[in-house]
Amino acid sequence: MALRVPCPHCGERPFTEFWCSGEVHPVPTARESIEANFDRVWMRDNRPGVQLERWFHAQGCRRWLTFERDTRTNRFVRLVEGEPV
């Protein structure tokens, strides 16, 4: 069974309509080095379990969505705004 993303605007859609930008890392409060900025933006922890991810619905509503997703089961747990999926 293919991964399906629960878009709150378009309904449940196949993952092929989305672009996953990966894990969400907190934005630093102080100025960070170029190396630290690169690591925060591009390097992935890729740990098993629930993590925050950003998804862009490229072939649908064209909105960015932030989800908690369990990487072990590919189950979307919730939208960060608190709406259930």
Image: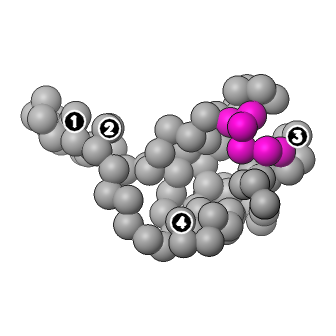
- Going from N to C along the chain, the mark reached first, 2 or 4, is 2
Mark 1 → mark 3, Cα distance in angstroms: 34 Å
Q: Is residue 6 above or below residue 43?
A: below
> Looking at the rendered structure, which numbered label has been put on residue 41?
2
The range drawn in magenta is 13-18
Q: Quadrant of residue 62?
A: top right
Query: Can residue 54 be seen by looking at this rendering?
Result: yes
**How far is the residue under mark 4 from the one under mark 3?**
23 Å
Quickly name the residue at label 3: 10
Q: Are marks 1 and 2 in contact (CB under 8 Å)?
A: yes
When asked about the image quadrant of residue 83, the answer is bottom right
Asked if the residues shown at circle 2 and circle 4 are in contact, with their CB atoms under 8 angstroms apart, the answer is no
Question: Disc 4 designates what residue?
Answer: 71
The three-letter amino acid code for the residue at tag 4 is: Thr
Q: Is disc 3 placed on a helix, strand or loop?
A: loop
Give the distance between the C-alpha atoms of the residues marked 1 and 4, in whole angstroms.
Answer: 24 Å
Query: Which quadrant would the C terminus be assigned to in this image?
Result: bottom right
Residue at left 53%, top 65%? 71
Cα separation between marks 1 and 2: 6 Å
- Seen as rendered, the residue at the extreme front is 1
Other-residue count near label 4 (Cα within 10 Å), few / some / many at <14 / 14–19 / ≥20? some
SS at badge 1: helix
**Viewer-nearest residue: 63 or 14:** 14
Q: CA distance from mark 2 to mark 4?
A: 19 Å
Work out whether mark 1 precedes mark 4 in sequence or the reverse, and give the earlier one: 1
The residue at the point 33 percent across, 50 percent down is 44
Q: Position of residue 9 (x, y in %)?
A: 85, 41
Seen in the picture, residue 83 relative to 14 is either above or below; the reply is: below
Q: Is residue 62 toward the left or the right of residue 13 in the image?
A: left
Q: Amino acid at mark 1?
A: Asn
Quadrant in which the N terminus appears: bottom right
